[in-house]
Structure formats: structure tokens, C-alpha cells
Image: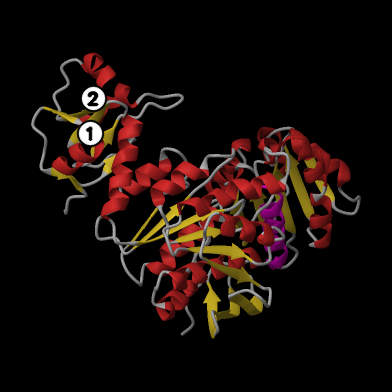
Amino acid sequence: MSLLWSSDAMLEAMNGRPVGTLPEGITGISIDTRTLKEGEAFFAIKGDALDGHDYATAAVAAGAALLVVAEAKLPALGKLKAPLIVVDDVLAALTRLGIASRERSHAQIIAVTGSVGKTTTKEALRHVLADCGKVHASVASFNNHWGVPLTLARMPGDTDFGVFEIGMNHPDEIRPLVRMVRPHVALITLIAAAHLGQFKNLQEIAAAKAEIFEGLVPGGYALLNRDDKYFKSLEKMAFAAGVEHIKSFGESRLADYRLMKLKLHDECSCMTARLDGEEVVAKVGAPGRHIVQNVLAVLGAAHLTGADMAKAVLALASLRAEGGRGERHVLEIGRGTFTLIDESYNANPASMRAAVELLAAAKPAGNGRRIAVLGDMLELGKHSARLHAELSAVISDNKIDMVFLGGPEMQALKTAMPVDIHAEYRQSVEELQPQLLKTIRAGDVIMVKSSKGTGFSRIVKTLLQKYNAAAPLAPAE
């Protein structure tokens, strides 16, 4: 296996001190001994709850080629028999290595932020660009003060396309991260009420997201959602940050990457789009209008980085929803099946609306029903009760048959629900789950959506454990 970093390059980039005989180099970087692979470097990062130095022995046992540790922790490591790089602060050293990785790279770099759709867009970019060159992208939602430098440091030197998700829940979080990433394309998916409890209003959220413009390389592109009501505001902030090129995506006739026609289906979507003047027809493997909106951004970013657009468009057909972000399961119940749509990773008002619309587009079988299982949307502060109650209209407009609501914030939605829609409410996941289990019947389509911290993913886990996956249909002769 080729080396990700030579030990000499690591020492120079991190301003480290070697202890013991270092290997020629490392094949990867780990901060978790549970997933560490033989030949990787283990960075002993000290987090809020855990200190990586406490796992140094486990890292050696797992096959770490070397350990990066803090000078102050060295005495506590005792007689540890392993090559070490000793640094002032492990996270700071990882950040320096990430910056060095960006400096050596010739890749086209895309940075993605926004209130909704960041990870879905990042994963779609990873998917469509894979046929166009060597792609390196963030794992999961590694989008914070340690996830971004870790993703940078892990980027191989021969990468063609780098895709970085950058998140925030306070002002001044994106700024230092994007200055490390230095993207050629800075993409903002949408401004919506996520983390609203930390801000006065959506305009403040837009301003915080606009920090992404400050890291653009000279001549780089800002790529904005033309359908977002904060488009004009973001455009002004991009110009103020010195951005030379601003492109847009959406359904607006003014969008550079514009949706022209759309046909939504149960399992996919078919779209016609005009990409900077050229019309293309594409099948999108993952269903939902919100996915198509993300796909427009993906195609725009791919175009701006010079990717082979024919390959990128074709790749959309095999795009699939990620776990917790719309992944579908067909499960056996009695002599029939029901469909589970897993949207349990996170939730805010905009993504909740998109998930309900996704459920509305699904087709129950026989006497099946559309059932929404909804948990609290967190970090909405003083706006929480109002934003939860407003979901009542979304549910009514989309003809959802039943709702199961859990969590203290969802009580506002239960109170606002019209009497003609059956609604079950319980304070917790544990109380709600039995009510759902005794309700499910063949033909149902069940969508589970909540903020991650509510634990609604446990409902998904229970359903997947209790019911067997249905065998896929055999292809026609």
C-alpha cells in the first residue's frame, strides 16, 4: 500500500520531535482505536469527554505505525514501546498537517455548507465525481474543528477532487476551517432554521454561512441557491468578501444550473436541467424534490471544477439515499411488506418539510397508510414551539394518514394537529415505540424523522431487527 505521509514530511509539517525509530511513513490517520488499521498513525486527541492518550496502548495493539502525542503527556505514557512523534498540542499538530496537505495538493476543492443538505450534497458529489477522477471527501459529518483538519490530513497527494463539508452552530466557526480548506468552489445549499437557538434570526445564520467565501482561492466560485430567499443577501456578502465569480442553481429562470422539468417517482426522479446553457436529461436514483435541488448544486459544482459532465450526469442514476437520510427498507410483515424510510439522522423545519413531502410521494400498497413518526427538532431556542406547531399545515397539505409524535417539543405539534388526522403523542421514544409497533400493517409506508439527539434512530433499529428485509424482486425474463 502506498504511503499517505512519510515520517519526515510529518515531522516537518507538525514541527514534531521523534522518539524511537520512526517507520518510513504511514498509510493513514486514525483518532479512534476501534477503527484503526495496521500501518496508520494514531493521533491522541484530547476531546471534551475522552483523551486519546488513554488509548495509546490499545493503538499499539491495533497495529499503529506511530503515535502522535503531546509533550505534556509523555511522562504518563511510561514505557510504551512504540515510535512517537511528540508535539506541543495534538489537535494543533493535526491542523498543521492538514494545512500542509492542502498546500501539496493539486486537486479541485469544493467546500459545502448550508442549513440543510450538506452531507447529502457532499456524498452526491463524492458519487458523481468518482467516475471523473480520484475523489477524497469527508467521512460521515466530519465538518467541525477536528473533522475538517483530519479530512484534510487524510487527503492523498494524487487526489483529483476534494469535497469538504463545513458545519457550524455559532458565528466564527466556518471562517478558520474554510481558510484551511481554500476551496475553488464554495457551495451554500440553503439558509433555514437550523441552530436558530444560537442566533437572533435567519439573517444571522446567513451571515455565519457566508464566512465560507473568505477562504475561496483567487478566481474561485461561490455557488448559491437562486430559490433561497437569502440569495440576494448571500450574493452581496460574496461580493463584499471579494468573490469574483458567483453562480447559482435552482428553478429560477435566472439560475445558471436550472431545473427545467421534473417527474417525481416512488424510487427515483427524472429531470431535465439546463447547465450553463446546455440541456441535459438525467435519472436521479434517490427520490424526492429536495434531492433534485441538491443534485442541481452537485452538477453546478462538478461543472465549475472541470469534471466530465457526461459521466457526472450518468452517475446520478445510481445515486442512493444514505442511512438516516432517506434510506429505504422494504420489510416483511405477515404475508406482506411495509416500507421504512429512515430520515432519523437530523431535523429542522426545512428538512422536516422535505421528508414529509417525500413520504407523500410514496405509494402505500393495498390498505396501507402513510405514517410519519416525528421527534423533536432541537436547537431552535425560543422559536421552537411555533416552528413545531407550523408542521401541522405541512402534514395536512401532504395528506399524511397518521402521525406518531415523541419528545417534549413535539407536544406543540400534537396540540396544533387537525382532528381528522390520527395523532399519537408520547413524551419519549420508549413510550412511543410500542404504539407504533402495534399499528404497523402490510402496505404501510413509515417515515422516521427527528434531530439526532432525540434517539429516534432507535425506532429504526428496532424495526430493522424485528422485521426481516424482503427479498428483492427477481428480474423479468
The residue that appears at 25% across and 60% down in the rendered structure is: 158
Crowding at dot 2, Cα within 10 Å, few <14 / some 14-19 / many 20+, comes out as: some
| The quarter of the displayed image where residue 83 is located | top left
| Residue 441 spot, x, y in % from top left | 70, 55
Q: For residue 355: magenta? A: yes
Q: Residue at x 69, y 58 (%)?
A: 230
Residue 152: x, y in percent?
Answer: 35, 48
Question: Which numbered disc covers residue 15?
Answer: 1
- Tell me the residue at 91%/50% (across/down): 419
Three-letter code for the amino acid on which mark 2 is drawn: Thr
Look at the image and say whether residue 425 sits in the magenta stretch: no
Q: Name which residue lies at 39% across and 73% down.
A: 307
Which stretch appears magenta? 348-364
> What predominant SS class does the magenta segment belong to?
helix
Q: Secondary structure at mark 1?
A: loop
In the image, residue 361 lies at what x, y percent? 70, 67
- Pick whichever of labels 1 and 2 is earlier in the sequence: 1
